[in-house]
Structures are given as C-alpha cells and as structure tokens.
Image (tube, rainbow, N blue to C red):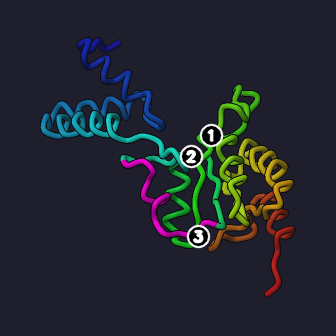
Amino acid sequence: MVHFSNSLTKLLAELQKLPGVGEKTALRLAFHLLKSPENANALAESLQDVTSRVRFCSVCFGITEEDPCWLCTAERDDSAICVVEEPQDLLAVERTRAFRGRYHVLQGALSPLNGITPSQLRIAELIKRLEGGGVREVVLATNFTVEGEATALYLARLIKPLGIRVTRLAHGIPLGSDLEYVDAATVQRALEGRSEV
C-alpha cells in the first residue's frame, strides 16, 4: 500500500467525495493540481467564492447570487410554473428555451426508503405560491425515476383540488433511437402517450 503525505491523503479523500470521482480519478486530479499550482490556487479561490456567494433563491429555490434570482425578476409568464427536483434540472429545462413561465425547485424528490418526506422538500412553499392565484398550469418536470414519479403523483394530488391544470413532461422513445434497442416499459409509455399526426 502506498503511503502519501497527510495533506495529499486529505485532498484525495475530499476529491473522492465528488460524484463520479473514484480513487484513480482523484489521484489523477490531485497530481494535476500539484503540477500546476496556479490552477490549484484558482480552483481554491473559485470554490471559496462560490460557497460564500451562491445561495438558494427565496422564491423558486434555484441557485443565485442575487435574491430573488434573475428568473424570478425577469418578465415571464406568471400563469405557468415548472416544478423540478434540483437546480441543475431547472438549467436543463431553461436551456431548451421552450418554457417561458416560472420555476420551482423542490430540492429533491420523495423517497421514504431514504427518509425523504414531503416536509423535507419545498412543497409547502410551492402550494403557498399556487394559493396566491394567477397560476393556471403546473408542469411537473420531475425525473422519470421511482422517486420522481412518486413525487409527481403526490404533487398532482395536492394541486388538482386547487383548480389548477397539472401536466407532466412527455416521455417515451428518444429521437434517433431504434425500437429494437428500447426497453419495453419505454415503448409502452410511448404508445400510451401517442398523439395524433
């Protein structure tokens, strides 16, 4: 077993806490940073800057340096709210430029097995926004996982009694794929969600 200095061992341990970074990748990153101290210093500065300045928007709970965020203060369609699980999901939807309404980030998805209940998500804040009036549609853009589906179903049951239209992102066969390689559940959902041509 190779023994590293305490500081390098600590750096490797911290790098391995990042998603997708295993022992080999952490070692590669650490040695890259050691070879170029100017990159290491710039990275350290950026990390300190982002952790001290970035926070969650008090309205939509996306990430921002200004509160409320630019999406909450921009001129957009107030009658529609797109609900996503995480801030990066908001960015994925916004990148399409297909949605012109407002957003709401739940900060996760329901997962009773992992101890994540409705009280740990930003569901109460969403309902409060909806009770303010003016919202005619809520687009549920949670992930297509067991947790995401459960969250979407839970939210639909809460929102429909408010007289607000609830929609879900379409899902099915990806563009450019061959049917023979698509799993049966995806083909089934695509058939169920088919539209007239």
Distance between the alpha carbons at the discs numbered 1 and 3: 25 Å
Distance between the alpha carbons at the discs numbered 2 and 3: 21 Å
Q: Secondary structure at mark 3?
A: strand
Q: Which residue is mark 2?
A: 86
Q: Amino acid at mark 2?
A: Glu
- In magenta, the rendered stretch is 66-78
Question: With 90 as the anchor, is 183 left or right in this view?
Answer: right
Which of the image's four quarters has the N terminus? top left
- Disc 1 residue crowd, few under 14, some 14–19, many 20+, Cα 10 Å: many
Q: Residue at image x 62%, y 74%?
A: 176
Q: Which residue is mark 1?
A: 108
Task: State which mark lies toward you, 2 or 3.
Answer: 3
Q: Give the number of the disc on residue 77.
A: 3
Residue 68 part of the magenta-drawn span: yes
- Disc 3 residue crowd, few under 14, some 14–19, many 20+, Cα 10 Å: few
Mark 2 touches mark 1? (CB < 8 Å) = yes
Q: Amino acid at mark 1?
A: Gly
Q: Position of residue 6 (x, y in %)?
A: 26, 12
Does residue 142 lie above or below 166 as drawn?
A: above
Q: Residue at image x 84%, y 49%?
A: 157
Which of the image's four quarters has the C terminus? bottom right
Q: Position of residue 139 (x, y in %)?
A: 69, 61
The answer to whether residue 54 shows anywhere in this view is yes
- Disc 2 residue crowd, few under 14, some 14–19, many 20+, Cα 10 Å: some
Q: Residue at image x 32%, y 29%?
A: 27
Q: Give the number of the disc on residue 52.
A: none
Q: Residue at image x 82%, y 74%?
A: 194
Q: Which of marks 3 and 1 precedes in the sequence?
A: 3
Distance between the alpha carbons at the discs numbered 2 and 1: 6 Å
Task: State which mark lies toward you, 1 or 3.
Answer: 3
